[in-house]
Image (tube, grey):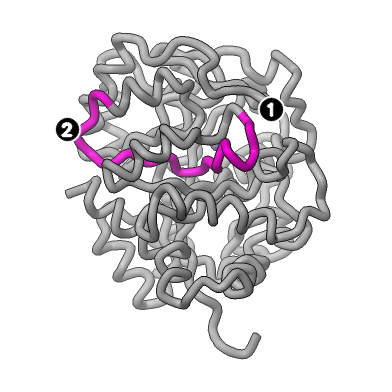
């Protein structure tokens, strides 16, 4: 491709976790090193047109494990509850990592706290990071950590990962399965939604049970956002969204971000590395049919999942954009999916 790639602002990655796991294993890697084996690092982002995204701070039940290499969705040890002090410690480590990256980058990376921050970073060619918590284990019941992390730049929070915590219940990574797998939010979880609304922290619906989804929908005064979830009608995984859920997201003028994880894209939930990009486009087609052109975006799950070989890492984003062109999407729609819809929904959530 000769022209500059279409910029992408992506709704979910676990790159900070990969950096943290490597550091803990005594083999630290750098965000600035193209060969660091992460899906996202600064050189790969530049090559693929990745302009930035939401950077998750996720605490695996087994922090020593690289979730993209040795992860078994049927092993209950991966879904064990995590205690708050330990989770807060690891969250601090990941937030500090993002801040050190920003400082070391000398202007080439910006931790963004407003829509204007993201637009300005994109305009000058800097890489944007928005701090996100995936699973609120680090947050105490009095929300002291929430206050302080918000002041440090936290702008988005998923109440649960696919396990239980003080605030609610997550869906298993099961397929085929309805997302209606158990209880929703606890009273503490309902209070957390209110606290996030007050602080203008986006509440992310991905990983919640269906009951939890409806609990948030009934409480929040902001657009409904599932940062990295696909269409249940195409892949009947518990992690994907039913048409009823998609319709509620559309009604709130929210969005869903396409997750690249093979098991959430393949029609039978299989891990097939040679999965064609057209199968990802099938999800986007369905999401567009329910959410409209302003409600669909990307939520790659880079560095937290197994992506199709046709994409491989951030350098493969132009291949996905090309897949959209082949499917007949116009350039305006492609820009909306690639970045404009994310920036718009974040602005409406944070204002
Ligand atoms: Zn996730």
Q: Is residue 232 magenta?
A: yes
| Residue drawn at the location 67% of the way across and 66% of the way down | 316
Pointer 1 residue: 175
Residue 268 found in image quarter: top right
Crowd band around label 2 with a 10 angstrom C-alpha radius: few (<14), some (14–19), many (20+) = few
Q: Is residue 332 visible?
A: yes
- Per the image, the residue denoted by label 2 is 198
Residue in the image at 51% along x and 47% along y: 12
Report x, y in % for residue 253.
28, 48
Circle 1 or circle 2, nearest the eye: 1
The alpha-carbon separation of the residues under discs 1 and 2 comes to: 36 Å
Q: Quadrant of ligand 1?
A: top right
Q: Is residue 15 above or below residue 91?
A: below
**Which image quarter is the N terminus in?**
bottom right
Tell me the residue at 17%/49% (across/down): 351
37 versus 60 height, above or below: below
**Residue 140 x, y percent position in the rendering:** 34, 16
Residue 266 percent location from the top left of the image: 72, 44
Q: Main secondary structure of the magenta part?
A: loop
Task: Indicate left or right for 312 with 135 as reference.
Answer: right
What number is the disc on residue 297? none
Q: Which residues are magenta?
A: 218-237
Task: Tell me whether the residue at label 1 lies in contact with that at label 2, contact meaning CB atoms closer than 8 angstroms.
Answer: no
Q: Residue at x 74, y 54 (%)?
A: 308
Mark 1 Cβ inside 8 Å of ligand 1 = no
Circle nearer the N terminus (1, 2): 1
Identify the secondary structure beneath mark 1: loop
Q: Position of residue 181 (x, y in %)?
A: 54, 15
Dot 1 crowding, Cα within 10 Å, few <14, some 14–19, many 20+: many
Residue 44 located left or right of residue 128: right
């Amino acid at each position: 491709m000769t022209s500059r790639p279409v910029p992408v602002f992506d709704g979910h990655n676990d790159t900070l976790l990969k950096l943290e796991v490597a550091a803990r294993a005594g083999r630290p890697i750098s965000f600035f090193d193209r060969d660091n084996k992460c899906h996202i690092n600064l050189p790969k982002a530049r090559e693929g047109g990745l302009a930035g995204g939401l950077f998750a701070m996720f605490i695996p039940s087994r922090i020593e494990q690289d979730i993209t290499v040795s992860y078994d969705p049927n092993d209950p040890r991966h879904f064990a509850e995590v205690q708050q002090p330990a989770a807060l410690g690891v969250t601090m480590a990941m937030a500090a990592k993002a801040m050190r990256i920003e400082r070391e980058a000398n202007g080439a990376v910006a931790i963004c706290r407003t829509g204007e921050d993201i637009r300005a970073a994109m305009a000058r060619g800097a890489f944007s990071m928005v701090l996100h918590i995936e699973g609120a284990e680090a947050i105490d019941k009095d929300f002291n950590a929430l206050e302080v992390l918000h002041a440090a730049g936290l702008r988005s929070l998923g109440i649960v990962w696919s396990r239980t915590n003080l605030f609610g219940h997550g869906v298993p990574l099961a397929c085929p399965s309805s997302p209606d797998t158990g209880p929703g939010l606890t009273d503490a979880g309902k209070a957390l939604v209110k606290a996030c609304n007050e602080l203008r922290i986006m509440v992310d619906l991905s990983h919640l049970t269906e009951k939890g989804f409806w609990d948030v929908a009934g409480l929040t005064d902001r657009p409904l956002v599932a940062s990295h979830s696909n269409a249940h009608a195409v892949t009947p995984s518990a992690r994907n969204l039913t048409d009823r859920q998609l319709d509620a997201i559309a009604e709130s003028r929210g969005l869903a971000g396409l997750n690249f994880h093979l098991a959430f894209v393949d029609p039978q939930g299989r891990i097939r590395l040679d999965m064609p990009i057209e199968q990802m486009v099938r999800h986007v087609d369905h999401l567009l049919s329910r959410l409209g052109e302003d409600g669909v975006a990307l939520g790659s799950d880079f560095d937290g999942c197994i992506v199709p070989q046709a994409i491989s890492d951030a350098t493969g984003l132009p291949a996905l954009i090309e897949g959209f062109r082949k499917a007949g999407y116009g350039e305006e729609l492609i820009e909306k999916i690639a970045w404009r819809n994310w920036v718009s929904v974040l602005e409406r959530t944070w204002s």
